[in-house]
Image: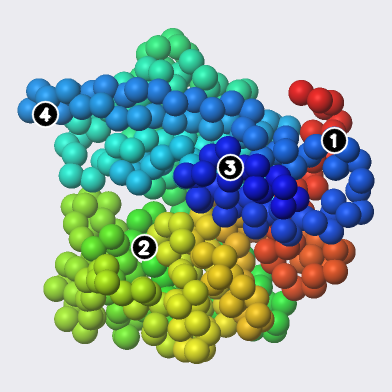
Amino acid sequence: MDTIIDEIRDRDPEQHEFHQAVQEVVESVKPVLDRNIEYRQQAILRRITEPERVLMFRVPWMDDDGQVQVNRGFRVEMNSALGPYKGGLRFHASVNLGIIKFLAFEQVFKNSLTTLSMGGGKGGSDFDPKGKSDNEVMRFCQSFMSELYRHIGPNTDVPAGDIGVGAREIGYLFGMYKRLKNEFTGVLTGKSLAWGGSLIRPEATGYGAVYFAAEMLHTRGDSLENKGCLVSGSGNVAQFTTEKIIQLGGRVLTLSDSSGYIFDEQGIDRKKLDYVKELKNIRRGRISEYAEQYPSAVYTPVNPTLDHNPLWGHKADCGFPSATQNEINGVDAQHLVDNGVRLICEGANMPTTPDAVDIFLDHRICYAPGKAANAGGVAVSGLEMAQNSMRLSWPRKEVDDRLKQIMKSIHRTCLEAAEEYGNPGNYVAGANIAGFVKVVHAMLDQGLV
């Protein structure tokens, strides 16, 4: 296993996030490999860590001043053993091939855990929609899709949204796909309700993470009632994580964006959350404006000289990192432990660094990795695909009930896998092992392809 990790690092030395994701999975599944010599003979680790297909392409577009701009587009089709590639598109200045490969690799096991027939993939661009006009975003999306459309389809690869890709971007992407292919199919998920979207899809990742957290607490005879919660981010995942925590009786104390964070000791209630949704979704403003609207809140701007994020330094019961990868480091993790946090449930993908994960596990924190805890988003994307295939829409309660049952199933599967392989209560080991075993069985059944 060490040899394989070294090979990956030597082959792609700049892809640090991908190395991190692979190492976590490989270390977790060692007991599985020890029990199943066939997996080694079939070079399963080498096959599962190498994408089936990597696409990288130029995306030229024109801004409102008539100036031609050029970005890079990516799609990593990682593994299709369980079904069509499925995973979001991320539009953000930080996007590069290593980040997309890490996200695609994580997506393989996340999709496996949902019990739905979906392989894993991910895509995106270093284009940043922030500060762009609707027309600029439309022109970029149309150019991006003019290349991507050749490689996707409802039975091949079904992208969705991620950071920087919401309903607006999905609409522009779908419109261009429809024009180029001359067909109306469920090739993208996260669509608007009027033309093939699913109820609960915008809420699914945040709701699902909170459902998972509630299950973790339930196994310990506890609930979210009256729990103080730290939530990072202020986008889709953070908003609906906050909404569901409020519904279940918890109290959200923080939200953030790339400029800084707010701490509201009184708690973010429904009225305040509605303000955040209007601020971020419609006006596309900054979280600092929350403190101007509600003077009881304290806004703290980002300080790049700090070796930690002060958002994670407040006393609380639960933490829901919902912004981006590696936002909790070892210093942050120790602050969380010292300040009484006893549950961490990841709404973002890999928001916790390896040293921080070790601290959580050493202190027996209830720690749920993103591939399990935030699988609700892709689960409802899978339900959207099913509805598109049948040309019908399920009512809100039916989709929400299905989401809740899927998150309960993922929670149970993680615990059972961790128990079976001698690591009871370890959700990291359980999620990695359960997701890995299902994909590997499918790969072996389908031969050396």
Q: CA distance from mark 3 to mark 1?
A: 22 Å
Depth order, front residue of 262/223:
262
Q: CA distance from mark 1 to mark 2?
A: 42 Å
Q: In x, y percent, where is residue 163?
A: 39, 47
Q: Earlier in the sequence, mark 1 or mark 2?
A: 1
Circle 3 sits in a helix, a strand or a loop, which is it?
helix
Q: Quadrant of the C terminus?
A: top right
Q: Which residue is mark 4?
A: 64
User: What number is the disc on residue 10?
Assistant: 3
**Amino acid type indicated by mark 3:** Asp
User: What number is the disc on residue 403?
Assistant: none
Q: Which residue is mark 2?
A: 233
Instruction: Select label 1 or label 4 by which is in front.
Output: 1
Q: Determine whether 269 is above or below 369 in the image.
A: below
Q: Determine whether 308 is above or below 313 in the image.
A: above
Horizontal arrangement in the rendering, residue 26 relative to residue 164 (left or right): right
Disc 4 crowd rating (10 Å Cα; few below 14, some 14-19, many 20+) is few
**Amino acid type indicated by mark 1:** Gln
Horizontal arrangement in the rendering, residue 129 relative to residue 351 (left or right): left
Circle 1 sits in a helix, a strand or a loop, which is it?
loop
**Amino acid type indicated by mark 2:** Gly
Q: In x, y percent, where is residue 52?
A: 64, 28
Disc 3 crowd rating (10 Å Cα; few below 14, some 14-19, many 20+) is few
Disc 2 crowd rating (10 Å Cα; few below 14, some 14-19, many 20+) is many
